[in-house]
Amino acid sequence: MAFWSPYLGGSRSLFSDLLLRVFYPNSCLIRDSFRALRIPFWNPHIYGGVPFLANMQSAVLYPATLLYAWLPFPAALSCSQMAHSFLAAASMAGLAADTGLSLPAAILAGVVFSFNGYAVLHSAAPSNFNSYAWMPLVLMMLGRALRKDSWRYAVAAGAALALEVLAGHPQFVLYTALAAGVLWAAEIAPGSAPRSLGRQAGLGALAAGAAAILSAVLWVPAAQLARASPMAAGLGYDWATSYSLSPRDALSMLAVPLWPRILAPEGDPSVVGFYFGWLTLALAIAALGGDRRRWRGPALLTALGFAFALGRHLPGYRVLYGLFPPLRFFRFPAQALCLACLGVARLGGEGLESLLGRGAVSRRGALLVGLAIFAEYALFASRAVGTIDASLYAYRSPVAAFIKSRGGFGRVMMTPRTRSMLGRGAKSRLAAWLGFRDSLLPNLAAAEGLDDADGFEVMRFSSYDRVLSQIDADPRSRWLDLLGVRYVLTFWGLPKDKFVLAKAWGPLRLYENKNALPRARIEGSAGTARIAAYEPNRVLIEAFARSPARLVLADVDAPGWRAAVNGSATAITPSSGILRAVAVPAGRSRVEFRYLPPYFSAAAGLSGAGWLLAAGLGALALRRRP
């Protein structure tokens, strides 16, 4: 609380581009859905509609996400950040103590892991930081399972790993598995009998199986979305290695104290940045003079973390990229520095213990060293952690208010050229970002409850990318009409034969598309269609057709959408290749569309049963404890 209070209390709030453009709009959809007692399976506000729960970064089913349903965004962010900082520090201390470190040294390891520069910089993306915080608890429980030959601890490790999956960033789950393998090979397997190695493999499989079952409710729909997204074919070497840590930046951030005051690394600091400080590094180096069996595991983790983080700068990485398939599906190699955080934290505790010993005097010495490191990290955070006036998140855009006042279900969109000009010439940082909110830069229209034909997400349908390419290339694109894009925001004029100026706010102009088709419409017959109810997972339309026809809803179709006409199930036949359409009879009809991710019910049943069984086993173990 002492560390985070300056950034999470009063009129200030954590801030980053990702927080405003991804996590804040997501929290608005979560808030509205949870308060209406429904799960938001679908996000209708971006890309013409896209799965929401299946996007792991939304973390819909993660327990801490409930905070965003009932608290203002800055307050929910504050509570979550503090809770996960404590989780990271306490579980890292437990992991270090399990390896034989004294309590002061273990606590120091927890401080280093929770508050080092890499950790605090990742506060810019809650799914990253939350997943990071679970890493040491998974390793602690798995280590206990292997050392004590305990299936209960293996199940506990699986539960912790499942929560890391639900937290929203699968890349950290991969690194957790890699760290588990390294620590097992370096610290547990040596000296184990062949029979024990077989038991250890079984316990590891039990932990992995438990995690898969407990988190199936998320990864099953996520896998469905991934297959339909640009991720399916792999990211390509250039994209997959974006935000690799350059050797120059690595040396600079290792050697220069409080580097955010004087250095700007190559790439986003919240991704490529890290900081351990000279005192922590000195302790880590001191650990290397002790028993090799104690520092071998954490030293190997540190080396692997830096090696993977170098990405394209590492000789032979292209070969590794070809041989190790997971590297093709994750961006930002610099994220691998989380392995180095685990290693350096352990080495720092080992170094402290080797220098100060375990006596009463050493406890006072350890306290002084720990406070010095804590103060250094706090100074680093004062420059590195982004904050802004919390009023930014409470702001309501007059542009959005004007669009809502005109009614209807028309979509909005910003011209690509306009995005590159936003924020220039603003009088202050807050004013610049308020301008971004007024411009409805993707995904900020979603935070206002408006529907955008564009978006700012990696997890989207590949088929829709082709639509966006055509719109970007031609302001007269027929897709603007088919998708019901009624409003276009720009700094420049648009063709007068298609657009009419609706209103202007300084240089920002709002044009109305005269040719935009209704969001729901009858094709093949004279008739009308009216949207009677519109929710993330359900759309109800009242239609009238003079003869049998097709009802088109200008929302993207996807597996999982079901339709019923007058209460009878009806097949959805895509219109224009991607939109939803159903056949309707002559006369009046009530058409209902409902969405549930494919196989979600089975996955939810499996995970629910798994959690009940895990809870029962945990309660039984506690009752048997003397």
Image: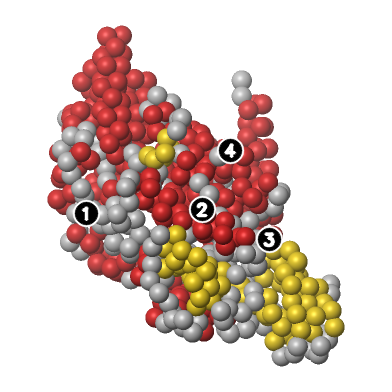
Q: Position of residue 537 (x, y in %)?
A: 67, 62
Amino acid carrying label 1: it is: Glu
Write down the quadrant of residue 530 in the picture. Answer: bottom right
Q: Point out which mark residue 71 bears.
A: 4
Indicate how the structure is coloured in the image: secondary structure
Q: Amino acid at mark 4?
A: Leu
Q: Earlier in the sequence, mark 2 or mark 4?
A: 4
Mark 1 nearby-residue class (10 Å; few <14, some 14–19, many ≥20): some
Q: Secondary structure at mark 1?
A: loop
Local secondary structure at mark 2: loop
The first of marks 4 and 3 along the sequence is 4
Q: Kindly identify the residue that appears in the image at 67 percent across and 83 percent down.
A: 573
Q: CA distance from mark 4 to mark 3?
A: 22 Å
The residues tagged by marks 1 and 2 sit, at their Cα atoms, a distance apart of 34 Å
Q: Residue at x 34, y 20 (%)?
A: 104
Which residue has dot 1 on it? 266
Instruction: Say which residue label 2 marks.
Output: 397
